[in-house]
Image (tube, rainbow, N blue to C red):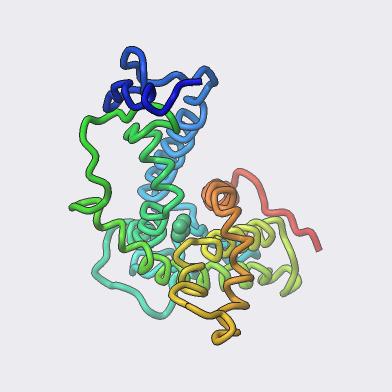
Amino acid sequence: MATTEQLTAVPVVIGGTCGGPPVRTRRRDRWWRAPAATVAFLSAFVAYATWAALENRDYFVGAAAHRDLISPFYSPCVAASCVAGARGGLYLSWWAISPAILVLAVPLGFRFTCYYYRKAYYRSFWRSPPACAVADGHRRYRGETRFPLVLQNLHRYFFLAGLVFNVILTIDAVMAFRLPGDGGIGVSLGTLVLCANAGLLWLYSLSCHACRHLCGGGVDQFSQHRVRHRLWRLVTPLNARHMQFAWASLAFVALADLYVRLVASGVFSDPKLF
Ligand code: FES
């Protein structure tokens, strides 16, 4: 085994590895699979979400089809151009383009600044670094101390704004139990889709690191803060699964939009379950 003196005598190459010629990594496993999968999945989501947001149609299934289903990409629908039945009492009369562009700003800001997604896209898109024990793709490292990455600190505010959207999408899920002209109240496949979507979004938000900090951060003695301790214990096991909730909720929100879109465009009817 090498002594401490021998180890410290080996030159350390920045951007390479300790000892031997400067190579990007000595890993032999397929470490590139996770960043490659992240690039593929996030690119597919961004492409689909952009198309769906600009499409500006087929985002609502209303009373004419005996349903009350709205795509999560278009809720709350707060533009004057929203289709009848989808728009609430408050709306922006001057907004002429797709209402989804208004809606998606907060959820996308929340996801973009998420600690987990930051790790995922820093590794996969920016190769900074691509994986553990793999050299950084850049010569210099500045962290998140300067513009524009310093804006990542807005995450805690996006978290709070995101909770408002969760409440709205939960109301949408409850409204999906309405089957106007088809028995009044019931459950269709669309009801379950919107309920599952809202549930996953809550799990994603409640497992957020900012949420855990809000519950139990900055406390010296939990014995003095029983309620915060309880909340912290509640969200901590969720926090351990934040990555899973991040991917599941991202995939499902796109699936929920696709489901509403297919029903609204007449590709198939939303089946009533009971
Ligand atoms: S850390 Fe991921 S949503 Fe807050």
Residue 265 at least partly seen: no
Residue 221 at least partly seen: yes
Query: In which quadrant is the C terminus drawn?
Result: bottom right
The residue lying furthest to the left in this view is 147
The residue lying furthest to the bottom in this view is 224
Give percent across and percent down for residue 76: 44, 68
Q: Nearer the viewer, residue 82 or 36?
A: 36
Count how many numbered circles sit on residues in the image.
0
In the figure, is residue 195 to the left or right of 153? right
Q: Indicate whether 171 appears above or below 67.
A: below
Q: Indicate whether 241 appears above or below 170.
A: above
Q: Nearer the viewer, residue 22 or 29?
A: 22
Q: Nearer the viewer, residue 187 or 7?
A: 7
Looking at the image, which residue is at 69% across and 59% down? 192
Q: Indicate whether 174 appears above or below 69.
A: below
In the figure, is residue 59 to the left or right of 128? right
Give percent across and percent down for residue 44: 45, 36
Looking at the image, which residue is at 62% across and 70% down? 233
Give percent across and percent down for residue 1: 51, 20
Q: Indicate whether 69 appears above or below 265.
A: below
Q: Nearer the viewer, residue 161 or 175?
A: 161
The residue lying furthest to the right in this view is 274
Give percent across and percent down for residue 58: 49, 52
